[in-house]
Image: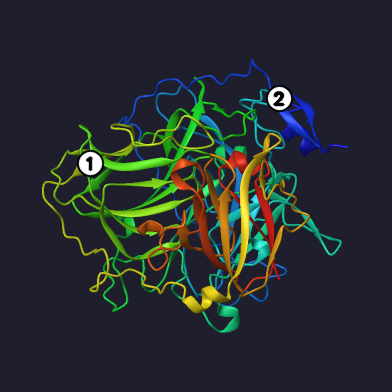
Amino acid sequence: MLTRRELLKLGLLSGGYTVLASGSGLRRVFADDVSIPASPRLAAFSDLNPLPIPGIAQEVTPFYSPGYKDFIGSGTRFFEIHEEERTVQVHPGLGRKTSIWGYRDVNVSQSDLVLGPTFKVRMNEGGIVVRMKNDLPTTPAGAPDPLRGFGVPHMTTHLHGGHHPSRSDGFPDNIHIGGVLQRFVTVPPGENGSHFYDYCYPLLDPGSSTGTPDDTERPSTLWYHDHFFDFTGPNVYRGLAGFFLVFDEKDSDDETDQSSTALRLPSGEFDVPLVLQDKRVDANGKLIYSTFGHDGFLGDTFFVNGAVQPFHEVRRRKYRFRFLNGSNARFYRVFLTNSSGQAFPMDQIATEGGLLARPIRGIQSFLIAPAERVEVVVDFTNFSSNTRLYFENRQPQNEGALPGEGVLRRGTQLLELRVTGKKPEYDPSRVGNAKGELRPFAAISAAELRRATRKTFEFDDSDGGWVINDRFANLERALTTSPRNAPQIWSLESGGDWAHPVHIHLEFMRVLRRNEGLPPLNERDGMAKKNTVVIGGPNFGDVEIFVKFRDYPGPFVFHCHNLEHEDMRMMARNDVV
């Protein structure tokens, strides 16, 4: 008998399409009358619509957390976050506020932002424990309308890019291990936060368990989001996301730091995280999402940090911008432009795999796929006061399953930057140390590559869904196992003309080859580390990566981060043994 989840995924509980047998599987057949209304036209860069900046997560009194005694010490910090439904003003032109699902710091009585609080943490200082309480409603707002009532209020939170125990990874579902049910997920929401789950993030360098910590493997910009099996797409789309920023003695969060190791990157108000998303809303401000398509949901309205095309004031000095693609399926090609479309240079300093070995100076644009992060430094010193600049998306995309080819001459302006100040101001920040380096590291050695075990994973479509090596996700069974600390080379291949941003949990990867040739500089081993890598389609092709799983045994997953592909089963379990 089909479970309720399977019925929901097949649409039998909400209507809209039927299901036909297709060989040994099932195939979804879509109804012709399902249409998604367009969003109302909303004025960009209204003076009443500044860029929202989430608050910083605050500690709470230490609490008892069973099962984590090996990771909790005198330096451990404790936090409590609630998942809740709330209303926020995403644009002043909408007559009503928008209902979202979001994370809220328990120290704050209410939040008027979409994004959850931003965590600021440091490596090797005792780690943190986060208690996530599920205060979500038992039914989605707007039900039974399938376009406005969507998502499932069950909770599992993934710290995307983190290096931590399996039970804190936000595994997508409860599974049996050795015949015993492992409860990775807090299932239905409880009243007043009575249902919760504790996540422990040791924040130790990879290799610490074997006495070989690697301090070049430190992350920079992580994010946390819901990861519930089959429903990650609608749940993240509703708002369940937040930033998690990691610092150390190099990237010290202090541009005035005079220590010999400090990079002195722009900090404080000059360090700005930006999440890019596309959504649809109706005239009453309600979010619209289609559960009927699984190629990838595309919105027609662009949000930055949960607000529709906001503005942000900048002073005449350097800024660090941390871009996160939080969209379900859309790719962005981001330029820094003025109102006439002239492009200005940026310096790239990081990917989702942390700081680059050295900056890539003067880039004109960057491509960012779902779940990827790109960090750039922009110097506004030589722009006059009252200049208007824009982060502009020139990536064509009309299909959810892949971006278009080429680059548009003009695109959608996502965020307006308003330059202030009659003259340049004192700026102690810099981009790279005296040697022009950020976080240098060696490429994987030839000896290590020779030792590596080789595996191939093909990402393809099948029977109306998405598969890895011809299999739909089955989290009760591992598709592959990885001996701990053993080097591996994975060939990631696309079986069709679709683009797949592939995310591997637990470890960063090194990109060795792209289509049998050297990868571009911003993902090349010895220069960059990656946590998500795009394969497939005419633009990307196949990729060969090096990965080694260290420290934490147990079940983890890897999957496509086009969230509709992921929810339609393009996911596999990898057991570190």
Instruction: Read off the residue under disc 1.
Output: 343
Q: Position of residue 553 (x, y in %)?
A: 68, 70
Q: Is residue 205 visible?
A: no
For the N terminus, the image quarter is: top right
Residue sticking out furthest to the right: 1
Up-down relation of residue 47 to residue 449 (above or below): above
Up-down relation of residue 100 to residue 225 (above or below): above
Residue 85 lies in quadrant: top right
Residue at x 71%, y 25% (from the top left corner): 29
Residue sticking out furthest to the top: 33
Q: Secondary structure at mark 1?
A: strand
Query: How packed is label 1: few (under 14 Cα within 10 Å), some, or many (20 or more)?
Result: some
Q: Position of residue 339 (x, y in %)?
A: 22, 32
Query: How packed is label 2: few (under 14 Cα within 10 Å), some, or many (20 or more)?
Result: some
For the C terminus, the image quarter is: bottom right
Instruction: Read off the residue under disc 2.
Output: 29
Up-down relation of residue 424 to residue 310 (above or below): below
Q: Is residue 118 left or right of residue 571?
A: left
Say which of 274 and 115 sits in front: 274
Disc 1 or disc 2, which is closer to the eye? 2
Residue sticking out furthest to the left: 423
What color scheme is it? rainbow
Q: Position of residue 181 (x, y in %)?
A: 82, 58
Q: Is residue 76 visible?
A: yes
